[in-house]
Image (tube, rainbow, N blue to C red):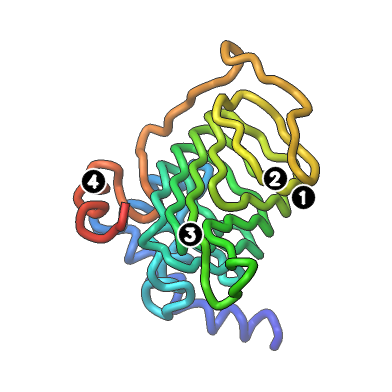
Amino acid sequence: MNALARRALQAPFRVSARAMRRVPGFKLFDETRDTQTPVTVGMWVRQQVFGVNHGPYWPVHPTSRVVGWRNVLAGVETSPGYMPGCYVQALGTIEIGDYTQIGPSVGLISANHEPGDLRRHRIGKITIGRYCWLGMGAMVLPDVTLGDFTVVGAGAVVTRSFPDGYCVIAGNPAAPIRSLDPEACTRHRSRREYHGFIPKARFAAFRAAELAL
């Protein structure tokens, strides 16, 4: 398909995108534009209209997968699976604080098979604080708690908790390689705050009605 044909096919979508931006209910496209996890018209249409990764209340890349989204409490500007190749398994609960960034190919695994009976799962939970960063290919396993400002190095496998945060962890199994000075860590906030597709002001009601935690 040549460039002219592609532009012709995309023209109706561009027109509809411009129209959607003028509708009050779709202010999120402009209000999240300069955030860590901007929501585009394409993302919204792919999930809400075409049903690709339908369910989660935050944008999920088409190559990522979320199992059990009602067990996921995602903070402001925190969208697990926003980047490609992620796997979010929330048979148990997963709670992630505000402004935490999650890189590509990250795994969040809240439940494991019972070693003696692989048909059954041992349900756990994952708790990740605010302003954390999970690097590419990191994996967080059940019953792990990471405190605020925990940086997980690329490819790390996190098997135990680091609840105090303010550290960089790496390796398999992950271990601390550096401490962070809390006074040097910035607790920034965006002017408009969203939990994925949902404005912060409306999120408490959504959580009570739709989420398991």
| Label 4 – label 2 distance at C-alpha | 29 Å
Mark identifier at residue 135: 2
Residue type marked 3? Ile
Label 4: which secondary element: helix
The residue that disc 3 covers is 123
Label 2: which secondary element: loop
Determine crowd level at label 3: few under 14, some 14-19, many 20+ residues with C-alpha closer than 10 A: some
Could you tell me if the residues under marks 1 and 4 are in contact, i.e. CB atoms within 8 Å?
A: no
First of labels 1, 4 by sequence position = 1
| Label 3 – label 2 distance at C-alpha | 25 Å
Give the foreground label among 3 and 1.
3
Residue type marked 1? Gly
First of labels 3, 2 by sequence position = 3
First of labels 2, 1 by sequence position = 2
**Residue drawn at point x = 23 percent, y = 46 percent:** 204
Quarter where residue 8 is shown? bottom right
First of labels 4, 2 by sequence position = 2
Q: What quarter of the picture does the N terminus occupy?
A: bottom right
